Image (cartoon, rainbow, N blue to C red):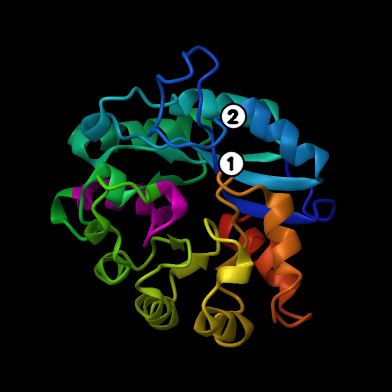
Amino acid sequence: MIDTGRVVAIDVHTHAELSVDAAPDACGPPHPFARPTAQQVADHYRALDMAAVIFPVDTESTSGRVRVPNEEVAQVAAANADVLIPFASIDPAKGRMGVLEARRLVEQHGTRGFKFHPSLQEFHPNDRAVYALYAEIEALGVPALFHTGQTAAVAGGGVRLKYSNPLALDDVAVDFPDLKIVLAHPSFPWQEEAISVALTKPNVYIDLSGWSPKYFPPILVQYANTLLRDKVLFGSDYPVIAPERWLADFEQIAIRDEVRPGILKHNAIRLLGLDA
């Protein structure tokens, strides 16, 4: 169990890039960064007195790469419950089987949320074909986190950015008002769209992962300090960005002192129900 009084921060966006049983190039989308196992992520964050949400990315239908097993991530998280909060990833192309998997993961394996990557999974988030999966996640009472915009990890020429426009999630937020939705990353080039969705939909949050804070657009800093101060979350996108680097750069930007604790920890505690 996460000791919320002890940890200095909660990173809501980290990746299990490699299964303990897989060859180095077997799991997950390819990118030039280090590829930790879930246990290596746990060890890294424990040394920093931080907690972390961790997940794989299931792109099996588009990349042909075998995902890091959701069950493995949940098992490692259970063995490192002082540090890790397990999310799962289900390729929406799996249809009804994905819906059944979502329930099994939550009820039998302790999964606490789900990660979607529209650009790599090649789907529009407001496609009605995915709604049965959202309905199941909403009924299970856990959050859904969606990659939005561009990050360094999706800068390759084969990635279609159109799938990650955060405005598509406005439909999802309306149609599933009890589903907690996290818009992952500063949503370049759609930052204002992301802010507008989070401002107008009480069930929508923004995580700040995937970019060094020194590159945050001024409008994001402005709203993080004011109207979105309770809905903005620390995320690094580890291993893309080390949390140590992210936090060092965060110290240098104009976030108000009274706002920082919420972004670094308290907003995530509420979102994830860690105070229950």
Task: Return the x and y of residue 63 as percentages of the image width and height.
Answer: 26, 31
How many numbered marks, from 0 up?
A: 2
Kindly identify the amino acid type of the residue bearing the numbered disc 1: Pro
The residue lying toward the viewer, choosing from 2 and 147, is 147
Q: Amino acid at mark 2?
A: Pro
Give me the disc on residue 239: 1
Which of the labelled discs sits on residue 21, or is there none?
Answer: none
Q: Is residue 126 left or right of residue 55?
A: left
- Farthest residue in the right direction? 6
Tell me if residue 212 can be seen: yes
Point 50% across, 41% down: residue:
87
Q: Are marks 1 and 2 in contact (CB under 8 Å)?
A: yes
Q: Between disc 1 and disc 2, whose residue precedes?
A: 2
Q: Based on the displayed image, in which of its 4 quarters is residue 75 positioned?
A: top right
Q: Which residue is mark 2?
A: 36
**How far is the residue under mark 1 from the one under mark 2?**
7 Å
On screen, residue 246 above or below 130: below
Residue at 64 percent of width and 52 percent of height:
11
Place of residue 251 in the rendered image (x, y in percent of width and height, measured from the top left): 76, 69
- The magenta segment is 130-153
Above or below for 124 versus 106? below
- Residue 262 located left or right of residue 99: right
